[in-house]
Amino acid sequence: MNNTFPHTDPGAILAILLAPIILLGPFVAHYWYKLRVKQWEMSLKHTMLERGMSAADIKAVLEASTPDGAKKHGCGKC
């Protein structure tokens, strides 16, 4: 009688290890991208405030940096 562990399929082990990365990767990448955009916007706002620009000027610059002054769904408020 053999007392070793049963043979495991390396492909199954690899699939179990890679599944969370494959499933969660796009979500993590999406929110990482959104975080980086927000950081860029905050840095830009800070720089413009240091240069003495008004709130209206800052708003105009930020709206010009997005397509048609709106985000993905087009409401223009986010």
Image (tube, helix red, strand yellow):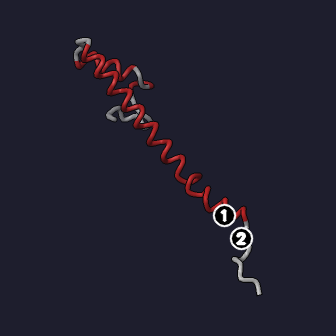
Q: Which residue ends up furthest to the bottom in the rendered image?
A: 1
If you read the primary sequence from the N terminus, does the residue marked by circle 1 or circle 2 appear first? 2
Residue 31, position in %: x, y? 44, 42
Q: Tell whether 73 sits left or right of 52.
A: right
Residue ID at (32%, 34%): 77
Q: Is residue 1 above or below residue 34?
A: below
Mark 1 = which residue? 13
Which quadrant, please, contains the N terminus?
bottom right
Residue ID at (42%, 37%): 34
Q: Is residue 14 above or below residue 73?
A: below
Which quadrant, please, contains the C terminus?
top left
Residue ID at (69%, 65%): 12
Residue ID at (69%, 77%): 5
Q: Which residue ends up furthest to the right in the rendered image?
A: 1
Give the CA separation, mark 1 to mark 2.
8 Å
The reply to whether discs 1 and 2 touch (Cβ–Cβ < 8 Å) is yes
Judge by depth and name the residue closer to the eye, 39 or 2. 2
Q: Tell whether 15 sits left or right of 36.
A: right
SS at circle 2: loop
Q: Which three-letter amino acid code belongs to the residue tagged 2? A: Thr
Q: Which three-letter amino acid code belongs to the residue tagged 1? A: Ile
Mark 2 = which residue? 8
